Structures are given as C-alpha cells and as structure tokens.
Image (cartoon, rainbow, N blue to C red):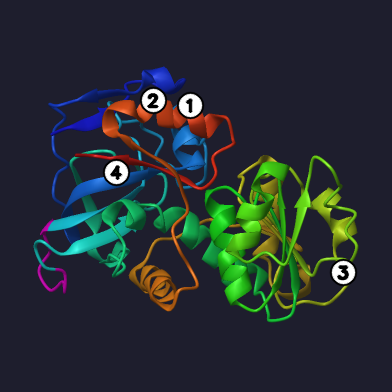
C-alpha cells in the first residue's frame, strides 16, 4: 500500500513515501476507505514531533512505523454489517483522538465517524473540511455557545480553523472581529468578518468595543491577557476558548468541566468526529454558508513540503495532499 510513513519523532524530513506499507487491519464496526485526498493540520505536526505523547488518553506504547494524517476523503471499499454505507460511496471524515493514518491509500475508520461527502465538492475540497471545520463548529456552538448579535473575536482568522470559524460565526448571526496579518485582511472580510484587525498595526486586546467571546485559534493570546478585552457579563457559555493544548489550557479545560459556579471561564476545544456534525457541515456547504478554504494542493510525494509550510504558521487555509 502506498503511504507516507515515519519511524521516529522529529522534523519534516523524518517523513518518507513508500509503496509497501501494510494495509490497516479490519476492525469491528469500521469501514475500509480508499483515500483520495488527505488534509494536513497543525495537529499532524505536533504528533510527528512527539509533542502529544503525554496527552490524557494517548496510548503509552508507540507503534512504528506511523502513518501521518487525520483528515481524509475517498470512497468506501467495504462497510461493516448493518451500516448504511455502500461500496463506492464518496465519504469524508477524520480519524479520532490521537491516532493517525490518513495519508495512505487506505484507512479503516469507525462507520459512525464517516459521512457522505458534501454534494458539489471534489474529494480534495471535502478533505479540507473535517478536523478544522469541526473544531470551529464545536468551539463556537458547544463551548462558547455563540448567540446572534454577540461580538466574537477570532484570533488567527486566516488559517485552517480560523477561516471556518469566521464563516460559521457569521452564519450564526454574530458580529465577527477577525484578527490576522495585513496581507489577509480582504480574504477574511470576504469570509464574513464585520471587522478585521491587523495585529501588526493594532492591538486586538484593546478593541474599540469589548468582545462577548474570544476564540484563540492561533494559541498566542492566553485568557489571562484576553480577559481585559472581554465584556463583563454572565454568559451561559465560555467567554474564551483556545485550540492549543498547553499546560495552562489543559488546566482551564479541567476547571471548565466543574459543575455550576465552580466552572472556569476558559476552555480548550477537543474536537470529536461524528456523523451528525459532519452532516451539519455538509448542510452548511449546501446552504452556501460554508466553503472549503485551501492554501495549496500537493501530491503525496511532496508531503514533507506540506509539513514545512505548516510549520511556518503562515498557511492561508488548508494544505491538502492527493494520494493518487
């Protein structure tokens, strides 16, 4: 099986493409998918570097070689008994938790973590959605509990998660303040931002009007700093959410899970894959309120280049590799 693999943690150069990787074994309740495209994420970089080895729920024993990638789109090869998936059907999804394996000719994924690919999108476009768009959806809807008319800042609005967060927040009826570099101002405005702050020219934590919520996609504005830009109010949801699992963010997540008034005000979004939310993304694509944002498409042979580009933290949307 053709796949990208790595045999140790390290820089992008540890990745190489082989033609003889063993196909993943079947698992009860899982479907086998012929992968056509896989998207790269900052999570892939952290996994490749070994930064997430000690995350809660991570298996202690490492299995080598590893196949990178969690986002994918392709066609069903075989479905488990009782599933409504059919061979040849176009599907998309993400590999749950701290596992990998999307950058390969085949992947085996629980059937309930797959959904039919959105109508009207290519498989390359569909692969650009799952992890980033699900992260944005679950942060805004489930943690922040964003309401129409609220003013929300999205820090890192031009990247993968940020570009979807701008679109989703605007569709939820919020006033979106996008924080990005000057070269991306018009790009994020086109995605639905009502206001754009160029962080190289102005301080996003000294806004003209306070925010009801702050979504720190980029991970460089901790709650201790962002709180001064937030409106003092008793909100049902968290006023601050981040995507980066730092020790501080993990502690905030634990506090956020406490009951009632003991709960902390800041949360870490830990994305979960599932059919219902993937179908929600598909409905938004069909309604025209969500579209894939792709920085570049590369063949699998250039996956090292894709990882290097991600590490610059200057990707404008998603990096997708075609498996071929």
- Identify residue for label 3: 231
Determine which residue is flagged by label 4.
102
- Using the image, determine if residue 117 lies above or below residue 270: below
Task: Look at discs 3 and 1 and give the one toward the viewer.
Answer: 1
**Could you give the CA–CA distance between mark 1 and mark 4, rounded to whole angstroms?**
18 Å
In the image, which residues are magenta? Answer: 77-85
Q: Nearer the viewer, residue 76 or 184?
A: 184
* Residue 248 is inside the magenta segment: no
Find out whether residue 83 is within the magenta segment.
yes
Q: Secondary structure at mark 3?
A: loop
Give the spatial CA distance, label 3 vs label 1: 38 Å
Asked which secondary structure carries label 2, the reply is helix
- Foreground residue, 279 or 8? 279
Mark found first going from the N terminus, 3 or 4: 4
Residue at (57% x, 47% y) in the render: 159
Which of the numbered marks, if any, corresponds to residue 308? 1
User: Which quadrant does the N terminus fall into?
Assistant: top left
Q: Nearer the viewer, mark 2 or mark 4?
A: 2
Q: In the structure shown, which secondary structural element does the residue marked by tag 4 occupy?
A: loop
Residue at 18%, 41% in the rendered image? 105
Residue 259 placement (x, y as % from top left): 69, 72
Given this view, does label 2 or label 3 mark the residue nearer the observer?
A: 2
Q: Residues within 10 Å of mark 2 (few under 14, many from 20)?
A: some
Mark 2 highlights which residue? 304
Q: CA distance from mark 2 to mark 1?
A: 6 Å
Q: Is residue 58 left or right of residue 269?
A: left
Nearer-N-terminus badge (2/3): 3
Categorize mark 1 by other alpha carbons within 10 Å: few (<14), some (14-19), many (20+).
some
């Amino acid at each position: 099986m053709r796949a990208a693999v790595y045999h140790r943690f390290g820089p992008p150069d540890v990745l190489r493409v082989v033609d003889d990787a063993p196909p993943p074994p079947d698992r009860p309740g899982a479907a086998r998918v012929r992968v056509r495209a896989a998207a790269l994420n900052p999570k892939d970089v952290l996994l490749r570097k070994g930064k997430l080895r000690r995350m809660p729920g991570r298996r202690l024993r490492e299995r080598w070689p590893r196949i990178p990638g969690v986002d994918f789109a392709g066609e069903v090869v075989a479905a488990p008994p009782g599933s409504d998936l059919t061979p040849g059907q176009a599907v998309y999804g993400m590999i749950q938790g701290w596992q990998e394996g999307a950058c390969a000719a085949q992947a085996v994924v629980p059937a309930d973590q797959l959904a039919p690919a959105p109508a009207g999108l290519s498989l390359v476009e569909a692969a650009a959605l799952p992890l980033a768009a699900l992260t944005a959806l679950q942060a805004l809807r489930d943690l922040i509990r964003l309401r129409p008319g609220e003013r929300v800042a999205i820090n890192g609005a031009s990247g993968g998660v940020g570009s979807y967060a701008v679109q989703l927040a605007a569709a939820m009826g919020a006033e979106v303040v996008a924080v990005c570099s000057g070269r991306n101002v018009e790009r994020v405005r086109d995605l639905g931002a009502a206001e754009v702050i160029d962080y190289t020219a102005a301080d996003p934590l000294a806004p003209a009007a306070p925010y009801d919520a702050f979504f720190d996609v980029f991970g460089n504005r901790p709650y201790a700093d962002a709180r001064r830009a937030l409106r003092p109010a008793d909100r049902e949801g968290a006023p601050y959410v981040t995507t980066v699992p730092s020790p501080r963010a993990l502690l905030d997540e634990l506090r956020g899970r406490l009951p009632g008034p003991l709960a902390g005000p800041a949360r870490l979004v830990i994305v979960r894959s599932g059919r219902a939310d993937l179908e929600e993304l598909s409905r938004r694509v069909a309604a025209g309120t969500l579209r894939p944002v792709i920085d570049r498409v590369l063949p699998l042979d250039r996956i090292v280049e894709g990882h290097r580009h991600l590490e610059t933290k200057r990707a404008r949307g998603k990096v997708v590799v075609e498996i071929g």
